[in-house]
Amino acid sequence: MWRASIFTLFPEMFPGPLGLSLAGDALKRNVWRLEAIDIRAHGLGRHRSVDDTPAGGGAGMVMRADVLAASLDAALEPDDPRPRLLMSPRGKPLTQARAREFAEAPGVAIVCGRFEGVDERVIAARRLEEVSIGDYVLSGGELAALVLLDAAVRLLPGVMGKEESGAEESFENGLLEYPHYTKPRVFEGHQIPDVLLSGDHAKIAAWREAEARALTAARRPDLLKPKARKS
């Protein structure tokens, strides 16, 4: 079973939206498993402290290496094969290809940072891979973890109604997805393109390919640039 372990100071944030819709239904059917682990359980002293002032000075607080390491070590076996991730704005961008890699793994272990960040030593010592969902800063890693989990869980076998649904989406083939239409045939004077009602599957496929390329060129031309060859 695909398993997600989330290390967080706010375990009550999970499953959150992942308890609804496709992911929630799959969770109830035991297609995947989610456990939210409270980092503060390994906090220090009477107040279960998990952070301290940054070395060298500066604003805010930093999550302690010893506390986070204790939380990880208590929950994860040394030979756990799942990727160990840290949601961070300085990480590598989450892409559809990476989401599919996570879905094909046995699961994921995700650390949700808070405050100014996480002590660099625990990132290195526990081999945490930093992952970003965009060039902006959130209050913590929990919302980013929810995004990553949703992107991966929906790709698990048995989650989506039709397996081919995921194959034709944006980014799966390097293009943005083509436009979609449904009833009514005419809406406020705008008709469904005739080709989609023609029953000619070859023409429909060609139209969708052309529309996808046009949308990608207009909105994300960077996706159409040739990839540099690795030497």
Image (cartoon, helix red, strand yellow):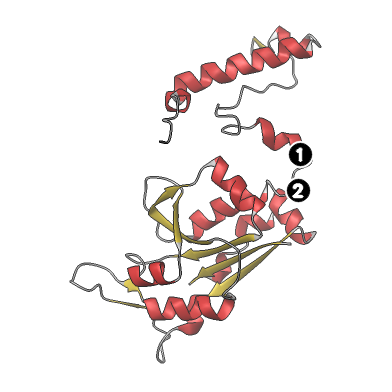
Q: Which residue is mark 2?
A: 157
Q: Residue at x 44, y 76 (%)?
A: 68
Residue nearest the observer in this picture, 225 or 181: 225
Up-down relation of residue 5 to residue 65 (above or below)? above
* Mark sitting earlier along the chain (2/1): 2
x, y percent for residue 99: 58, 47
Give the label on residue 163, or none: 1
Residue 220 visible in the displayed image = yes
- The answer to which image quadrant residue 190 occupies is top right
* Of the pair 14 and 166, the residue shown nearer to us: 166
Measured as percent of width and height from the top left, residue 186 is found at: 70, 13
Q: Quadrant of the C terminus?
A: top left
Whether residue 50 is visible to the viewer of this picture, yes or no, is: no
Instruction: Report helix, strand or loop for mark 1.
Output: helix
Query: What is the C-alpha distance between the residues marked 2 and 1?
Result: 7 Å
Tell me if 161 is positioned left or right of 148 in this view: right
Q: Classify residue 35 by image quadrant.
A: bottom right
Say what amino acid the circle numbered 1 marks. Glu
Image: 180 above or below 109 = above
- The residue located at (63%, 32%) in the rendering is 169
- Residue at disc 2, secondary structure: loop
Q: Is residue 36 left or right of residue 161?
A: left
In the foreground, 174 or 133: 174
Quadrant housing the N terminus: bottom right
What amino acid type is highlighted by mark number 2?
Pro
Give me the residue at 35% from left, 65% from top: 117
